[in-house]
């Protein structure tokens, strides 16, 4: 079974402050991890995937297999980062994505 | 490319009626996924289809729910004899062929079902 846990439903920070959105997963094999984002009135879209090891809009996420975590981080939050963020896991190539419950991030001015 | 198109965007049904939700994947995509989002909850996987084939329906309720993706036309999620608990947002997503599949899903805007 595969499971994704995002312990924080709501997260509020001030502009310029660091932000970390937590994601833990449960899967017996080697998963692929993703972060998806939904801005207000927009579709859910891919933010980044762990395989790419990329930084998108200043966000990074490192897969920690020992802690089974894939936390999303940004050193200096911006107001336009306010959105709903979902962590997702794919167990094997071609299979479904399992999403976490999501974290609503609000960046205050 | 218009992206994943879902219709209707909003659907109101009375208890006992049928709901049909449609999803046209992005051009060139052969895989369709349906997810349900209940109020105050996250996205729950329902079913994953290729054209004329159900790949994984492990998230589908055993009764009243069915999905298809015919050779021609959109994918359809059908809910028979709806109950109030079916009220939710239903999201469709698509992805390309397996060998081109990076794991990225392209989502529609969702269909919001309200059962009175």
Image (cartoon, rainbow, N blue to C red):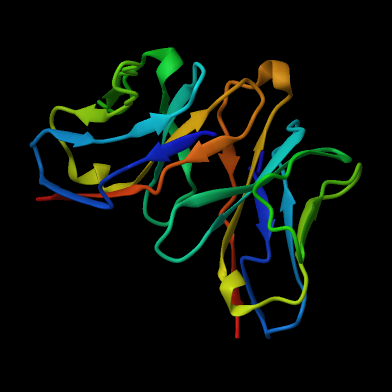
Question: What percent of the width, then of the height, locates residue B80?
Answer: 78, 71
For image coordinates 49% across by 21% down, the residue present is A31
Q: Is residue B55 left or right of residue B109?
A: right
Q: Which image quadrant for residue B25?
A: top right
Question: What percent of the width, then of the height, locates residue A24?
Answer: 34, 32
Q: Which image quadrant for residue A48?
A: top left
Query: Observer-nearest residue: B116 or B8?
Result: B116
Vertical position of residue A64 compared to residue B107: above or below: above
Vertical position of residue A59 compared to residue B12: above or below: above
Vertical position of residue A46 compared to residue B24: above or below: above
Question: What percent of the width, then of the height, locates residue B93?
Answer: 63, 43
For image coordinates 49% across by 48% down, the residue present is A43
Q: Which image quadrant for residue A78?
A: top left
For image coordinates 29% across by 22% down, the residue present is A67
Q: How many marks?
A: 0
Query: Observer-nearest residue: B97 or A87?
Result: A87
For image coordinates 31% across by 16% down, the residue present is A66
């Amino acid at each position: 079974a595969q499971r994704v846990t995002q312990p924080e439903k709501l997260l509020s920070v001030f502009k310029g402050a660091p932000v970390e959105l937590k994601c833990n997963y449960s899967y017996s094999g080697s998963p692929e991890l993703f972060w998806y984002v939904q801005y207000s009135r927009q579709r859910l879209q891919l933010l980044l995937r762990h395989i790419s090891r990329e930084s998108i809009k200043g966000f990074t996420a490192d897969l920690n297999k020992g802690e089974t975590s894939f936390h999303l981080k940004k050193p200096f939050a911006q107001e336009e980062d306010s959105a709903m963020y979902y962590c997702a896991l794919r167990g094997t190539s071609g299979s479904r994505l399992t999403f976490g419950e999501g974290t609503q991030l609000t960046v205050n001015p | 490319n218009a992206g994943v198109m879902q219709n209707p965007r909003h659907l109101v049904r009375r208890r006992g009626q049928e709901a049909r939700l449609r999803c046209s994947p992005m051009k060139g995509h052969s895989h369709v996924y349906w997810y349900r989002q209940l109020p105050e909850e996250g996205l729950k996987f329902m079913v994953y289809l290729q054209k004329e084939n159900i790949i994984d329906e492990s998230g589908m309720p055993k009764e009243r729910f069915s999905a298809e993706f015919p050779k021609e036309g959109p994918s359809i999620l059908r809910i028979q004899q709806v109950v109030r608990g079916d009220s939710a947002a239903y999201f469709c997503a698509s992805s390309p062929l397996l060998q081109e599949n990076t794991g990225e899903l392209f989502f529609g805007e969702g269909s919001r079902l309200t059962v009175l």
